[in-house]
Image (tube, rainbow, N blue to C red):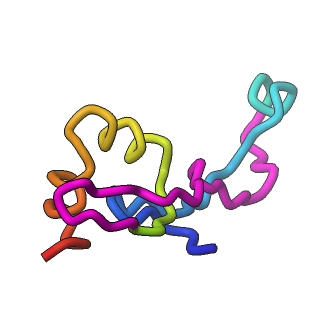
Amino acid sequence: MAKVCAITKKGSIVGGGYSNVVRATKFNPTGKARKYPNLQKKRIYVPELNKYFPLTLSTQAIKTINKKGAYAVLKEAGIIK
């Protein structure tokens, strides 16, 4: 499964963390942790083309498709020519 959204291009980021005890006393980082977006595999149907597209999408991209329509979003992202 790809770790990047096909539409929004969201990928993983590196973030640090602090425990609340450390935050209250002095600077002492707890280390780096990789954080991943909520990616899901979906088969998106485009009625204008009468075709399915299997994509790995973030939940934000799924909401955008529901709002704007599959054809418009996929064309804007460059998946459909």
Q: Name above or below for residue 66 compared with residue 14.
A: above
Query: Whole-percent x and y of residue 59?
Result: 49, 42
Residue visible at 20% across and 38% down?
68
**Residue 28 forms part of the magenta stretch:** yes
**Residue 18 forms part of the magenta stretch:** no
Query: Whole-percent x and y of residue 39?
Result: 57, 54
Q: Which of 6/34 is in front?
A: 6
Query: Whole-percent x and y of residue 16?
Result: 67, 51
The extreme right residue here reads 21
Residue visible at 26% across and 32% down?
67
Residue visible at 76% across and 39% down?
18
Q: Quadrant of the C terminus?
A: bottom left
In the image, taking residue 69 as reference, residue 21 lies left or right, namely right
Residue visible at 76% across and 35% down?
26
Q: Quadrant of residue 7?
A: bottom left
In the image, taking residue 8 as reference, residue 49 lies left or right, namely left
Q: Name above or below for residue 79 compared with residue 64.
A: below
Q: Which of 7/70 is in front?
A: 70
**Residues in magenta?**
26-52
Q: Quadrant of residue 44?
A: bottom left
Q: Quadrant of the N terminus?
A: bottom right
Count the marks.
Answer: 0
In the image, taking residue 27 as reference, residue 15 lies left or right, namely left
Q: Name above or below for residue 78 compared with residue 69.
A: below
Query: Whole-percent x and y of residue 14?
Result: 60, 60
